[in-house]
Image (spheres, rainbow, N blue to C red):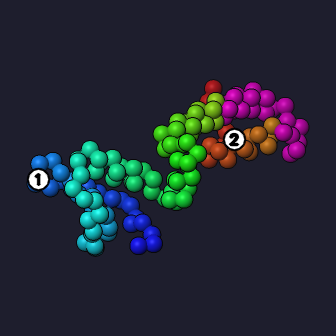
Amino acid sequence: MSEYTKEPWKHAQRAIAGLVDIYVGDYLSGRIERIGDVISVCNARRIVACVNACAGSSTDGLEAMVAEGRSVANMAMLYERAMDKRDTLLAAARKTLLDNLHLCDGDNCTLKALRDAVESVDGKPLVDDA
């Protein structure tokens, strides 16, 4: 097989004392294959969760990330930090605009460029809520 099976993956418990198989495939069409051998419930859940969490990522990209000492948890933390910083910058930009936009003196005003950028990120016009 040259390509991995697309997500989502699922796991199903057998009647044998807590053992699990991993199944992948197209559940709507019924084309399903068993890929996991008899493994513990905890390991099956983790494998399936990891595969599904990485949906859309290339295998080469994931392997490179691991080789560089990064992890999905680390990337999620960095993403959250970036979103927090973005929110802080946007709040400061909104306040600056609302306090000073009246000072603009034409279409080339840098405050208008800032307003356009903020509105582009927000997806809506800048409004003074005060």
What range is drawn magenta here? 89-110
Question: Of helix, strand and loop, which one carries label 1?
Answer: loop
- The reply, left or right, for residue 35 in relation to residue 87 is left
Residue 90 visible (yes or no): yes
Check the image and report above or below for 88 versus 118.
above
Residue 76 visible (yes or no): no
What type is the residue that disc 1 sits on? Ile
What type is the residue that disc 2 sits on? Val
Check the image and report above or below for 119 versus 54.
above
Q: Which of 14 and 100 is in front in this view?
A: 14
- The reply, left or right, for residue 40 in relation to residue 4 is left
Question: Of helix, strand and loop, which one carries label 2?
Answer: helix
Q: Nearer the viewer, residue 115 or 127?
A: 115
Q: Where is residue 51 in the image (x, y as percent from the top left)?
A: 40, 54
Which labelled disc corresponds to residue 69? none
Are there few (<14), some (14-19), or many (20+) residues within 10 Å of tag 2?
many
Check the image and report above or below for 47 versus 127.
below
Residue at (39%, 54%) from the top-left corner? 52
Give yes or no for residue 31 being in the magenta stretch: no
- Which quadrant is the C terminus positioned in? top right
Q: Mark 2 points at which residue?
A: 118
- Which quadrant is the N terminus positioned in? bottom left
The Cα atoms of the two marked residues, 2 and 1, are separated by 58 Å
Q: Looking at the image, is mark 2 or mark 1 nearer the viewer?
A: 1
Occupied quadrant, residue 104: top right
Q: Which of marks 2 and 1 is nearer the N terminus?
A: 1
Give yes or no for residue 94 being in the magenta stretch: yes
Q: Name the residue under label 1.
A: 16
Q: Where is residue 70 in the image (x, y as percent from the top left)?
A: 54, 42
Q: Position of residue 33 (x, y in %)?
A: 27, 68
Residue at (29%, 63%) from the top-left corner? 35
- The reply, left or right, for residue 121 in relation to residue 26 is right
